[in-house]
Amino acid sequence: MRRSSVETKAVILAAARERFAADGYDKATIRAIAADARIDPAMVMRYFGTKEKLFAAAAEFDLELPDLAPEQAGAGLVRHFLRTWEADEGLQVLLRTGVTNEAAAERMRTIFGGQVMPLVIDLTGDPERAPLRASLVASQLLGLALSRYILKFPPMVAATEEELVAWLSPTVQRYLTGP
């Protein structure tokens, strides 16, 4: 049975996400990804051109940031990110890879800068300080993800969503809307 180009591309991306998760960026190969997708490696190259472009496509994420009331933004953002990290292993792959690979790190910067910064500007009306505020928020959310999902510190893994929201939201709130 033949697949459409859209289906083929989706199969390649799914295989790439799994392979990058299992092997990391540096060890994942086009051949291994193609084998996982049960297609010829030339097809991967045809659709994506390079390993870097394949990774960028596989690491494309819409954080689907919710509309947040300014006074509840810290709690809302921490809760949203916990649920996002739980639901999408791809972000975990991106974080794991981003600490050792510049392309992955740049992808993470692009995602957070392009999606969190506008939220900060909307909440504060302060575009001048938004880059620092967004970076500070990212430091908390990425630190949470690293310690809970990648390094798996037992207390972080055992903590409930509500416990983590209670601990982290005041700090995130201060980064978002504090003086």
Image (cartoon, rainbow, N blue to C red):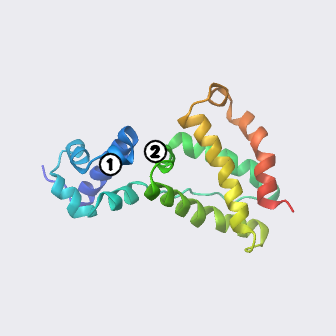
Side (left or right) of 135 relative to 44: right
Image coords of residue 169 (percent x, y)? 77, 46
Tell me where residue 81 appears, x and y as whole percent.
62, 47
Q: Is residue 89 left or right of residue 65?
A: left
Asked if the residue at tag 2 contacts the one at tag 1, i.e. Cβ–Cβ closer than 8 Å, the answer is no
Residue 130 position, x and y percent, is 72, 68
Q: Image check: 168 left or right of 24?
A: right
Which quadrant of the rendered structure holds the C terminus?
bottom right
In the rendered image, the residue lying farthest to the left is 1
* SS at badge 2: helix
Q: Nearer the viewer, residue 171 or 29?
A: 29
Horizontally, is 27 left or right of 43 in the view?
Answer: right
Give the residue type that dot 2 points to.
Answer: Val
Q: Quadrant of residue 129?
A: bottom right
- Residue designated by label 2: 93
Name the image quarter holding residue 148: top right
Residue 112 at x, y percent in the picture: 58, 60
Q: Amino acid at mark 1?
A: Ala
Whichever of callouts 1 and 2 sits on the residue coming sooner in the sequence is: 1
Residue drawn where x is 68% and y is 29% of the image: 159
In percent of the image, x 57 and y 57: which residue is there? 64
For the residue pair 80 and 114, the one nearer the viewer reads as: 114
Tell me the residue that label 1 is attached to: 16
* C-alpha distance separating marks 1 and 2: 11 Å
Q: Secondary structure at mark 1?
A: helix
